[in-house]
Amino acid sequence: MTGRMFHRIFAFVLLLSACGAAAAATQVNTDSLRLTFDASGNMQSALACFPACTGENARVQQFGDASVIRFEGAGAGAWSQTESHTQTHYELTFRQGAGARLTWRIPVNGYRIELQHAGIAGITLQSGESFRPREAAGFGNWLEQSRYVILNSGDAVQVALQDTDVTSQQADQWLGFRNRYWTLMAAPPSSLSVKPETADEMIDARISVNLIEGEWSFYIGPIEPSLLARASPELSNLLYAGLWFWLRWICFALFHLLAIIHLAIPSWGLSIMVLSVAVNILMTPLSRIADRFQDQVNDTEARLAPELQRIKQNFKGEEQAAKILALYKTERVHPLYSLKSLMGVAVVIPVFIGAFDMLAENIHLLHTGFLWISDLSRPDDLFNLPFMLPFFGNEFNALPFLMTGLSVVASSLHNPPALTAGLRKKQVRNMLLLAAAFFVLFYTFPAGMVLYWTTNNLISVSKSLWSRR
């Protein structure tokens, strides 16, 4: 017997003790999961690990406190249990004298579990207290919410636990619940109708459905692209589910680009900074087009500014509007010419959203430190304040101040040659207002996301300094 086989057999610990019809819990330990079953085959608790339950920096998530997957309608009678194992799977079978049967097939390495059954009427999935969202202040609370997910024909329907206006949904692929980084999903053998339990104050997920005939599959583990795809291609729809399909493509592209960078740079923090630089380089052709449009708008504004100011001073109401339109016609300028400047926003915003969502759901950043940041999946929390600020919480986060400071520097360096002093002052004021809005938005966001945008602002300052040279 090889050492690896001995380790696997030793890890598959079955603790059974009988006292009449009662039996103790059965524990199954694998490289990825720690599962506990009661005497009737119900899964009492599950602990999922990423990348593995042993080794450095293992991330873990507990599912359920007294029940994770419970079966109903088996009838009365004592249960018996048998177990077997191969090099790839463990198998637990629970039988009842009345004919009910549950057979769990658990992989040695992986998160997809198979279930065969007979004589069971229903099944209930529950999340438990340990699965509740982490506390977060401000907008950061958006990211930490638990929700139901139902996959039907490739579409992912997400339902908030507190959403009371819920109708039955058809699930032909997977159904279950998730938090920011972890999920429990069940795949029925055929399509069924499901209505998740919701309430105003609900904090734990609970789904009950009929246990239709055929083999069921369960995924209990991390929301990570390669692992989800390995378990089932349809599970990849869990990622970035709230975005349009083309924005999801951007998210996946950025995820794989970050993974490639991380192969060369072991630090995830440095990898995020390099990702920001790489995205700026890749977007250079589009950025140049956007800059050219912005320069054209600046030239037009500078040319029209004196006459527009005279018209606004001397005319009011409809007469003013008529004079302005006449000026546009004389100068051969379209009334909506300023929309050209939105080209820069149209280029930046989709990539910004893609990076935002990709970093928000990237489990590799969970419990990963960088510089003074203890966890890139949380605000950097340099120190705790002795008081609580509404919305902002009691954590002093240094990175948003650095990000905003770089925005202010970039604004001060902004000096397009075509603009008059008044127009330049107006643009700088708008840039400072935008920087303030980003500070409020980002202050309670995870440090990994703020680090990406801070690096982007540093690149903007560097470009402006180079241009001034």
Image (cartoon, grey):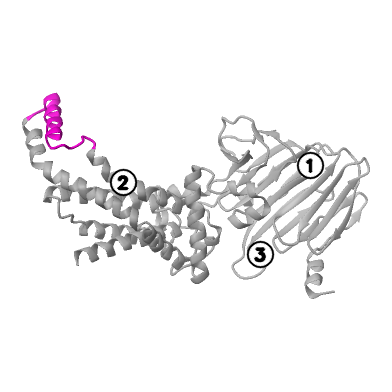
Residue drawn at the location 75% of the way across and 62% of the way down: 108
| Residue 323, magenta (yes or no) | yes
Residue name at image x 83 percent, y 44 percent: 117
Magenta residues (range): 315-336
User: Which residue carries the number 3 mark?
Assistant: 52
Residue 255 location (% of width, % of height):
51, 57
Discs 3/2, front: 2
Callout 2 environment at 10 Å: few (<14), some (14 to 19), or many (20+)? Answer: some
Rendered image quadrant of residue 381 = bottom left
Q: Which amino acid lies under the numbered mark 2 shown in the image of this protein?
A: Met
Q: Residue at x 36, y 51 (%)?
A: 348
Mark 2 lies on residue: 343
Q: Earlier in the sequence, mark 3 or mark 1?
A: 3
- Lower sequence index among marks 1 and 2: 1
The disc, 3 or 2, on the residue closer to the chain's N-terminal end is: 3
Instruction: Tell me, for residue 202, which label it has, or none.
Output: none
